Amino acid sequence: MALCRARLGAAVSSIHATPIVFELTKSSRVGGWLSTVNSSNQLTLGAVTVIGTGNTPLEQVQPVTPRYYFYDAPIPKLNTTFSNITSLVSPIASTDFEANFGPVLGTSLNTTQLSLLRAQVAMAHAKGIKVRYWDQPGWPISTRNGIWRQLTAEGVDLINVDDLLAAGGFSDTSNYW
């Protein structure tokens, strides 16, 4: 069975949109399709995990039980503002790659950037949270591929890509990149 992870973002104010979007998940609950957390804080994985991203208000996610939707926490704040977040609320945390690390000069992160990456991955993984970085360098191709390799080697769980053909060649046995 293939798993699907849905991330929700809204082009309108999230305070008003979030309840409406999450209400739309009701029909998927009947068949047991959605991952859920019950009132005893037990997680049951479904084929679809709905994760509110962007400006989803945490206060509209965290206290709800049973809950059929989750929160995309900001990676850089997992050890400060969002230190109380666990994988039961946020199975993934993400951030803008460039805003987090700054520009990449060459084909890999420098030592300062790599230290930050390792600290963020360790913090998230200690909480059982998977990490996702978006907006990685796309050009030059050698930088993009080098960053993909480095993120994977350092334990990043999800890598956003715009070039699906290039990403499709990504594996330990592929010499594509």
Image (spheres, rainbow, N blue to C red):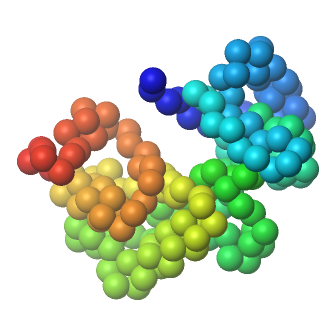
Q: Quadrant of residue 31?
A: top right
Relative placement, left or right, of 129 versus 165 is: right
| Count of marks, rendered view | 0
**Vertical side of 118 occupied by 28: above or below:** above
**Front residue of this view, candidates 128 and 24:** 128
Does the rendering let one see residue 26?
Answer: yes
Quarter of the image where the N terminus is located? top left
Using the image, determine if residue 23 lies above or below residue 88: above
Q: Is 17 placed left or right of 164 in the picture?
A: right
Q: Position of residue 65 (x, y in %)?
A: 89, 41
Q: x, y (%) of residue 139? A: 27, 53
At 63% across and 51% down in the image, what residue appears?
Answer: 91
**Residue at point 73% right, 77% down?**
80
Give how far across and how far down residue 129 sits, in percent. 59, 59
Q: Percent from the top left, x then y, of residue 148?
A: 30, 56
Vertical relation: 113 (above or below) 147: below
Is any atom of residue 55 visible in this view?
no
Q: Residue at x 32, y 51 (%)?
A: 138
With 7 as the anchor, is 174 left or right in this view?
A: left
Q: Could you tell whether 171 is left or right of 26 in the image?
A: left
Q: Foreground: 105 or 32?
A: 32
Question: Going 76% across and 21% down the picture, which residue do you hit?
Answer: 29
